[in-house]
Amino acid sequence: MSKTRLGQTPSQTVGPFFHFGLPYEGDSNLLVGDAQGQHIVVEGKVTDGAGEAVPDVMIEIWQANAAGKYDHPEDTQDKPVDEGFHGFGRCATDKEGIFRFQTVKPGAVPGPGNSLQAPHLVTFVFGRGMLKQLLTRIYFEDEAHNANDVVLGLVPDERRGTLIARKTNSSTYRMDIVLQGEGETVFFDY
Amino acid sequence: MADVIPYNREEKSAQPPSLYPPYNSTVLRAPKQPLVILPHTLSEVTGPVYGHGRILPVDADLTKQHPGEPLGERIIVSGRVLDENGRPVPNTLVEVWQCNAAGRYIHARDQHPAPLDPNFSGAGRVVTDAEGNYKFTTIKPGAYPWRNHPNAWRPAHIHFSMFGPSFINRLVTQMYFPGDPLFAFDPIYQGIPDVKARERMVSRFDMDTTIPEWALGYKFDIVLRGRNATPMEH
């Protein structure tokens, strides 16, 4: 018995002129209040297949709070919601292709089966020349649990490092996003 | 915690490839490595409830954001945000942006020699109601040239951005107007493999929402991915 299924609306590029429509004041600062946990900066540079900086894409992130709880009704874990942190951020890259978020280091969250996923940011890249957005993840190099993460386990060994932000000082992590070519970031079919 | 209920996957014929050479800018921005197939986890089936606090009535009327009336053909765009099962997507943010009636964006990088309109910015935001309905008032955007290929013109369009119930539902698209002769020449529109699916991006003129002596009505429904509690069904 199959019901009529409606067809998905196709994706189209955000184009080059999204800057007056999508970015908003404070969009890249997820610390809306007195957010609990370690406050960090997550930054990176976006480059294209010619190795050139990409100054006109937009990055969006979605993440759990420091306790590993998503601010969403389908997260039924018995963990506290943080009134000072909702987990969504948006950042247009600057002239040098740099994006930068102020956020908290997320906690580990449940994964498939009874597994636990290492802390990560779900990350979308939107841009001119991209008919649909690309999905990737940002993990953190100083998390021992990366070794057991189910999603990282799906990624070929030699490419796994493209999803792991390096610590550049006590509170800053950097993960560059390479859209194409040498060191190409892993993107997901979701 | 129990495993999550996954969403449907991308409908391949309805969604564009990353690489579509007729649209030149895809050539250096499309991944060359195969995508890694991601199971949907709690990270994907949750998502932001975003923007509700800051929405003002003027955000839904792009003709009322300045002291004077913008030039152009006043239109009312309305429709529903639904999932593939036909269920409404309530309380979700819809962001729109567009050029003015002359085909010019209020953006420093838009060099098209058409006039800016001091009474039109071209950005709006609305939240769907309990039945997934949204509505906004604006002016009909113009077509404009771009440099993808010689004599390239974009069909008139309004950019739409939707969140939906989870981050996996995130969709950015463009709404077009019926009967535009530029569809046949536009690689962004043509980038959708299935001809029928392309037509889902075309609004329809609607007399019922046309307001006498005021504005023309256009209807545009948006369908986001749905999910099945019983994955065997399809």
Image: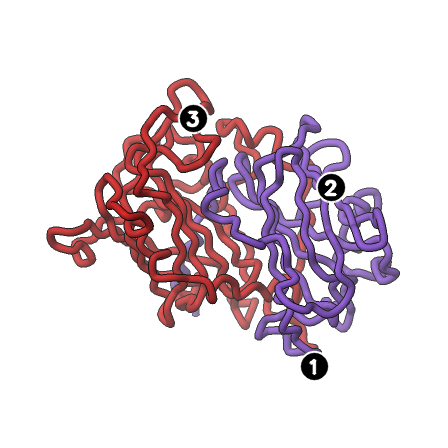
In the rendered image, which residue does mark 2 sit on? A176
Chain containing the residue with disc 3: B
Alpha carbons under labels 3 and 2: distance apart: 30 Å
In the rendered image, which residue does mark 3 sit on? B111
Q: Which chain is red?
A: B
Residue B226 on image: x %, y %: 49, 63
Q: Is residue A120 above or below residue B158?
A: below
Q: Amino acid at mark 3?
A: Gln
Is residue B223 or residue A33 the one in the foreground? A33
Give the crowd class for mark 3: few <14, some 14-19, many >=20 residues within 10 Å. few
Of tags 3 and 2, the one toward the viewer is 3
Alpha carbons under labels 3 and 1: distance apart: 54 Å
The residue drawn where x is 52% and y is 63% is B50
Of tags 3 and 1, the one toward the viewer is 3
Left or right, residue A79 beside residue B207: right
The residue drawn where x is 32% and y is 45% is B202
| SS of the residue under disc 2 | loop
Is residue B64 or residue A174 the one in the foreground? B64
Q: Are marks 3 and 2 on the same chain?
A: no
* Residue with the most extreme left position: B213
The residue drawn where x is 47% and y is 66% is B53
Q: Is residue B132 visible?
A: yes
Mark found first going from the N terminus, 1 or 2: 1
* Residue with the most extreme top position: B150
Q: Which chain is purple?
A: A
Per the rendering, the mark at residue B54 is none
Q: Amino acid at mark 2?
A: Asp
Q: Are marks 3 and 1 on the same chain?
A: no
| SS of the residue under disc 1 | loop
Contact check, label 3 and label 2, Cβ < 8 Å? no
Contact check, label 3 and label 1, Cβ < 8 Å? no
